[in-house]
Image (cartoon, rainbow, N blue to C red):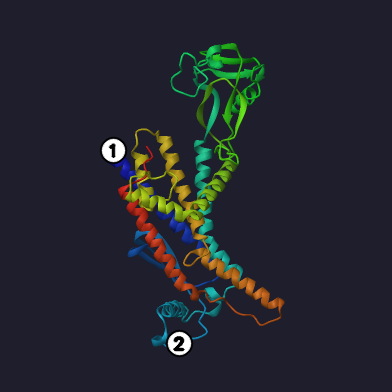
């Protein structure tokens, strides 16, 4: 593998990551500006600032490490109800008060109606949801480019292979029955245009005709080297596993695969990339969101598997969690591979960036600080609390003091750092191998 294409793939991923982060923060910035919140900073990345420019009251900048970003809004937390002396506070108490003090400092000389915590709940939710929503929109756009511009893999009515025997094996013994397709004279490259006189233009139509026709002779009309031939084929009955909508084998209560008796000819289709309407991007987004959510729900178990692979003989799972370092390496491997066409490389890199944005969408909606979902959860709790007070005809309880949850924030950050360290280590010593 050439090093230049590999580095180019890594660079494309880093640029895409930076753009994804920048657009995420823009999703927060735009509604914040619309709702007149004072935004002091809009930054992409962490670490030393490489570029900075101030327009109006907001400083815009790019930092050295493109692994995150933030906007600094005035008055993120409401002032606390009590301010105990610093010497009497616990470590966590100081953590809470430091967050309040920083928020109070950002609110100095700012009109009350421009403070984040003073906004109506619905406005705060829009601001905090704007970032993840921007990632979701970007994921849809990237998937749309794939399905419209390059297409999706689709089985055609042209044959790629014809089995010589019924058994699903590379070699056939003398006692293995011949497969009906080969016995009848079907050949790879044949294009099936009709079955029993009914026109055929897609593989689904071929499969639908064969499955219920065990023991019945079907007239296959095929095009071969410019000729049109009609070949009689009699499917045989075989037992095959049942597959669900997700493509997985359906299992019964006993754990065994569920099977069904179907017609079998022993032919396989050529798969081509076929352009799809833009609406085909919606199922891709939905499937990726569901898959990412399942990954997060099972994250402890999946991290154990990563740890066992990193410190043991096990191999990494292709569908397991992976760090930014690992994703960058995968992008480089794809770009530098001789096994993938140019179109395939473009589609793969676009798919990686689309999946990355779905991951940013789902992960940031986890209802824990410092993630966007934590602020949204606090706003929703405030809405519920105020509604309950109105029902009971009690005074407005005021904004929820989410600064109290800063100890949880610290725990979440420590867990995230530990998780990232494990994944990065695993991606260095036991990387995911895609070829």
Give the percent coordinates (x, y) of residue 316: 38, 45
| Residue neighbourhood size for the residue with mark 1, other residues' Cα within 10 Å, grouped as few (<14), some (14–19), many (≥20) | few
Q: CA distance from mark 1 to mark 2?
A: 63 Å
- Asked if 388 appears above or below 425 in the picture, the reply is below
Give the percent coordinates (x, y) of residue 319: 45, 45
> Where the N terminus falls, by quadrant?
top left
Q: Nearer the viewer, residue 379 or 76?
A: 379
> Where the C terminus falls, by quadrant?
top left
Give residue 421's quadrant in the image: bottom left
SS category of the residue bearing label 1: loop
SS category of the residue bearing label 2: loop
- What's the residue at 57%, 64% (across, down)? 126
Give the percent coordinates (x, y) of residue 162: 50, 19
- What's the residue at 54%, 12% (across, down)? 183
- What's the residue at 54%, 57% (across, down)? 133
Question: Residue 7: in sight, yes or no?
Answer: yes
Residue lying at the far left in this picture: please name it.
3
Q: Nearer the viewer, residue 2 or 419?
A: 419
- Asked if 204 appears above or below 411 in the picture, the reply is above
| Residue neighbourhood size for the residue with mark 2, other residues' Cα within 10 Å, grouped as few (<14), some (14–19), many (≥20) | few
Give the percent coordinates (x, y) of residue 338: 34, 33
Foreground label between 1 and 2: 2
What residue did someone put label 2 on? Answer: 84
What residue did someone put label 1 on? Answer: 2
- The numbered mark, 1 or 2, whose residue comes first in the sequence reads 1
Residue lying at the far front in this picture: please name it.
254
Q: Nearer the viewer, residue 251 or 156?
A: 251
């Amino acid at each position: 593998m050439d090093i230049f294409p590999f580095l180019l793939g890594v660079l494309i991923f880093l640029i895409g990551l930076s753009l994804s982060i920048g657009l995420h923060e823009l999703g927060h910035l735009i509604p914040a500006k619309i709702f007149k919140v004072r935004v002091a900073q809009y930054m992409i990345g962490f670490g030393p600032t490489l570029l900075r420019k101030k327009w109006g009251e907001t400083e815009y900048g790019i930092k050295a490490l493109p692994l995150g970003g933030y906007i600094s809004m005035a008055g993120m937390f409401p002032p606390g109800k009590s301010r105990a002396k610093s010497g009497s506070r616990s470590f966590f108490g100081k953590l809470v008060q430091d967050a309040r003090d920083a928020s109070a400092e950002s609110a100095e000389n700012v009109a009350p109606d421009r403070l984040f915590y003073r906004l109506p709940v619905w406005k705060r939710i829009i601001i905090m949801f704007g970032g993840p929503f921007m990632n979701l929109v970007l994921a849809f756009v990237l998937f749309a480019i794939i399905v419209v511009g390059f297409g999706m893999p689709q089985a055609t009515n042209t044959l790629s292979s014809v089995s010589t025997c019924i058994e699903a094996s590379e070699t056939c013994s003398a006692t293995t029955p011949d497969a009906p397709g080969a016995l009848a004279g079907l050949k790879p490259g044949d294009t099936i245009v009709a079955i029993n006189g009914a026109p055929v233009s897609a593989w689904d139509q071929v499969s639908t005709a064969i499955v219920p026709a065990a023991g019945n002779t079907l007239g296959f009309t095929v095009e071969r080297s410019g000729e049109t031939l009609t070949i009689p084929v009699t499917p045989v009955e075989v037992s095959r596993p049942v597959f669900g909508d997700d493509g997985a084998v359906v299992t019964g209560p006993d754990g065994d695969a569920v099977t069904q008796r179907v017609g079998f000819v022993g032919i396989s289709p050529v798969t081509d990339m076929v352009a799809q309407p833009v609406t085909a991007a919606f199922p891709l987004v939905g499937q990726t969101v569901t898959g990412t959510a399942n990954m997060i729900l099972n994250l402890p178990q999946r991290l154990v598997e990563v740890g066992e692979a990193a410190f043991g003989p096990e191999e990494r799972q292709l569908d397991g969690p992976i760090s930014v370092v690992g994703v960058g390496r995968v992008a480089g491997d794809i770009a530098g591979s001789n096994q993938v066409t140019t179109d395939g490389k473009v589609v793969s890199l676009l798919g990686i960036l689309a999946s990355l944005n779905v991951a940013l969408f789902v992960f940031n909606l986890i209802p824990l600080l410092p993630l966007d979902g934590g602020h949204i959860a606090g706003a929703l709790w405030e809405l519920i609390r105020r509604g309950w007070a109105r029902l009971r005809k009690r005074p407005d309880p005021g904004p929820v003091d989410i600064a109290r949850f800063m100890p949880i924030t610290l725990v979440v950050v420590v867990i995230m750092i530990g998780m990232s360290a494990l994944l990065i280590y695993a991606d260095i010593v036991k990387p995911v191998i895609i070829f």
